[in-house]
Amino acid sequence: MTDPNKIKVYVVDDSAVVRQALMHMLQGEPGIELMGSAPNPLIAGPVIRKTRPDVLLLDIEMPGMDGLTFLRQIMGEMPIATVICSTLTEQGSKIALDALAAGAVAVVGKPRLGLRQFLEDSRRELVQTLKTAARSRPRGIAPGPASARATASNAPPPVVPGVHGLAVNKPVVLGASTGGTQAIESVLMGLPGDCPGIAIVQHMPEHFTAMYAQRLDAACAMHVREARDGDRIQRGVVLIAPGGKHMQLRKSGGQYFAVISDGPPVNRHKPSVDVLFQSAAECAGKDVLAILLTGMGNDGARGMKRLHDGGARTVAQNEETCVVFGMPMEAIRLQGVDEVLPLGQVARAILQFDRRG
């Protein structure tokens, strides 16, 4: 009999070694109950549909039916918080991004060799990810190209090109975590190609950010790329902080530039939203718009408070449209937010900030 106070987890992975290691790991974990496991979606499907676990831990590459196809089926029928656990080769990264776009909450990488030891070493991170996923609000994603994914409930309002050429250079800084890949895409899809330069920190593994930027670049009017050290923050360009590195802003000659650096994680993250926001507070002061979207934890909250107190414009995503209402909630709690908006109105807030000059 299941314990209603525990998070019910179901594992789908074709590797017997992985299933056994996860069973050993999760069976003794307080607050988590392993409901069962299966070597492929064809076996897992009927069980999941009947028992409906809180979290699905899903591999991608499996015989019979791949994990991505199965995820799309499940999210279309009965959205379940899903964590992808897969090898992160270049091809694997692309597929994992497809999974995030299809509604997966998070992606956990695993090596092809030394799986058992890796899973044991990563126990704390994996358990935290599962607990985060259980608190999320999974949303089914309609099939189709990225440009067609927005629905009437979350689509940004129609926008018109801003006034531009001679406007003062005012940057936008944006941070997100769990659920952020889809949220960022939704925001950028609502912007014309001549918007102010945007610097983004999305908590994401290093294998992912370049490919994620390429995907956004193909879907959005603005040019999107993974940030390089020394890149200028300029109109029509979105810079994504590279995974495994911090991104800061610096000002020189009236222009803003990205500084990419190594260093210890901040708030357990690298890149960290707080690192970006604190640097924006130092060099841009009130001439910046800071946005905090869906995500677990408090990364970015203190930086947003500092920006707010320095006169910057600050916006947080509202609880109803967040996958995880953690980071925005913490910024609101610190009284660092000027405006709390549903995701579909964030693009408009950027345009309004731009028009104020």
Image: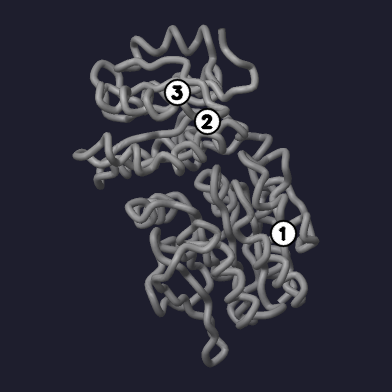
Towards the viewer: 189 or 334: 334
- Residue 226 placed where, x, y %? 39, 63
**Which numbered disc, 2 or 1, marks the residue that appears first in the sequence?**
2
Front label number (2 vs 3): 3
Which of the 4 image quarters holds residue 117? top left
Could you say whether the residue bearing mark 1 is in a helix, strand or loop? strand
Q: Can you identify the residue that label 2 sits on?
A: 141
Q: Amino acid at mark 2?
A: Ile
Q: Evaluate whether residue 261 shows in this view.
A: yes
Left or right: residue 191 versus residue 225 is: right
Residue name at image x 67 percent, y 44 percent? 325
Residue name at image x 47 percent, y 75 percent? 258
**Which numbered disc, 2 or 3, marks the residue that appears first in the sequence?**
3
Question: Which residue reaches farthest front?
Answer: 28
CB-based contact (under 8 Å), mark 1 and mark 3: no
Question: Which residue reaches farthest bottom?
Answer: 253
Q: Can you identify the residue that label 3 sits on?
A: 27
**Which numbered disc, 1 or 3, marks the residue that appears first in the sequence?**
3
Q: Can you identify the residue that label 1 sits on?
A: 315
Could you say whether the residue bearing mark 2 is in a helix, strand or loop? loop
Could you say whether the residue bearing mark 3 is in a helix, strand or loop? helix
- How many other residues sit within 10 Å of disc 2, few (<14), some (14-19) or many (≥20)? some
Q: Quadrant of the N terminus?
A: top right
Q: Amino acid at mark 1?
A: Val
CB-based contact (under 8 Å), mark 2 and mark 1: no
Residue name at image x 42 percent, y 70 percent? 263
Left or right: residue 123 versus residue 197 is: left
CB-based contact (under 8 Å), mark 2 and mark 3: no
Front label number (2 vs 1): 1
The residues bearing labels 1 and 3 have C-alpha atoms spaced at a distance of 41 Å
Q: Which mark is residue 36?
A: none
